[in-house]
Image (cartoon, rainbow, N blue to C red):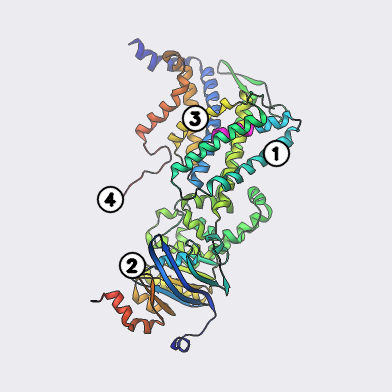
Amino acid sequence: MSENQTVAAGEPLLSLQHVSLSFGGVKAISDVSFDIRKGEIRAIIGPNGAGKTSMLNVINGFYQPQLGRILFRGEARRRMRPFEAASQGIARTFQNVALFKGMTTLDNIMTGRNLRMKKSLFWQALRHGPALEEEIAHRRFCEGIIDFLEIEHIRKTPVGALPYGLQKRVELGRALAMEPELLLLDEPMAGMNLEEKEDMSRFIIEANRHLGATIALIEHDIGVVMDLSTRVVVLEYGRKIADDVPDVVKADQKVIDAYLGVAH
Amino acid sequence: MNLLNAIFVDPFAQMISSPDLLVQTIWEGFVGGVLYALIALGFVLIYKASGVFNFAQGIMMVFAALTLVGLHEHGVPAWIALLATIAIMYALAVGIERLVLRPLVNQPDIMLLMATFGITYFLIGLGEWVFGGNPKAMITQQLFLPSGALDFKILGGSVMLQKLDIAAAAIAIVMVAVLGLFFQKTRIGRALRAVADDHQAALSVGISLNQIWVIVWFTAGVVALATGIMWGARSEVSFALQVLALKALPVLILGGLTSIPGAIVGGLIIGVGEKLGEFYWGPLMGSGIDSWLAYFIALAFLLFRPQGLFGERIIERI
């Protein structure tokens, strides 16, 4: 009830209803429901092993939940494979950077255009005519992202050779190149120093405001979470224990207990 | 003393005294090496994209060549037979992806390797059943492959180049160049490299693994067809040809399973090294040197560069 007063009520872009996921006998997620509204930055937080990454894996189709429903743009999804999720506009980054290490920054970001390049294999093989024009147009788009992320100086560097903070940035660039409607960020600031975190926060906010991406992010730095996010959902042992605007969540006794531990 | 002389002095003296023979030997080794490189390339393509060591690579080469010749025997014009064979290699790629790779996804590597043994025997059986087991002659003329030889009077002697060998080398070089361009500069090529690097990340940007597997197995099939045509033209098309794939193994040891430049350079080193060894040191060792020399070269090389030609030195954090 207080949610709707404090947060501009956007349409739900994605809503998860009573989702449960288990691996054999281990329950990773039990009966979790929440939604992500168009245009918001939605944080998912919780102690280690709470099921946050599993949640993202469910959203982009790496895992299939055993129970529950997922509505994306108001439509219920049946089993969905990752590349189908991608083609519907869901992009993501990974907790442990998952880049194509042998490829340059530019090539990595170009892979994000994969689904938007439609010219047939025949023209591509000849690298001629329409396929060449298409390649050039997409490359221009990627150069725009490179400018935006301030990584011009490493355009031609194989990403395996880059420091960790820059790799995270390239990975964000690859996800942005997909022009995603929903962008999932798994600990985008893990292992960064203060300055790198500030840069990354700025990119996330700009991606949200100017590029129009709805964002769901997992992050351990509570300060960052409180600053960035519109609403926060808190998981513990695969269950949802709180779901509200940052100020309310911060004061929630269950959340404080989950983070600080509590004598039973 | 005599032996040392025969190993370390005599062969080099011969090389210098009759350079035309040396050039001839290197050329023959080069052509063989180019063809080894093509076979190794087939292994590398599939290993990079699907993590499978494809034992069936050799038989794919024989099967493709056999299909081409067999169709022609049944009265299909050569060029149509060639296109039909390419189509059959595509169907084979789709079939392997559907029936073998997809059901076995996430299984241990050894399962996939065993599955390629299965593919091998399936293709041997299918090939023999449809086209018979007798050796056949490659339809060289119908495919406008040249025959005869060019004789160059140089270096105080003569060097003879088979026109077929020249064509084989040229076709192989063009093919490698086209593949290289395709991998570096196109969307599908980027997707292939992406899959080779990181499956999960590739999935997350919307690359369909299934589609990539079909493309890779099809590409390897076309490379196998080209190799089969050229080896078939040099000898004949028979199931015995598949042992040539074993010659690709030292190439892979040398070049690494994941490196395309490695496959090419490794193929050339093995091809040239083998011919030189056979010609200059062969008489010393007795016959049969060609069956083990390639492995010897690869192993000797590994003593000095354990990561292979282009492999990265693996440094593990402990």
Q: Is residue A176 magenta?
A: no
Front-lying residue, B273 or B55: B55
Q: Nearer the viewer, mark 3 or mark 2?
A: 2
Up/down of B306 relative to B210, above or below: above
Residue beneath disc 2: A48
Label 3 SS: helix
Image position, residue B32 (x, y; %): 54, 27
Label 4 SS: loop
Residue B84: mark: 1
Residue beneath disc 4: B318
In magenta, the rendered stretch is B57-65
Whether discs 3 and 2 lie on one chain: the answer is no
Residue kind at label 2, given as amino acid type: Asn
Residue kind at label 4, given as amino acid type: Ile
Residue beneath disc 3: B246
Q: Is residue B98 left or right of residue B250?
A: right
Q: Earlier in the sequence, mark 1 or mark 3?
A: 1
Up/down of A244 relative to B10, above or below: below
Tally the numbered discs.
4
Up/down of A110 relative to B228, above or below: below
Residue kind at label 1, given as amino acid type: Ala
Front-lying residue, B12 or A1: A1
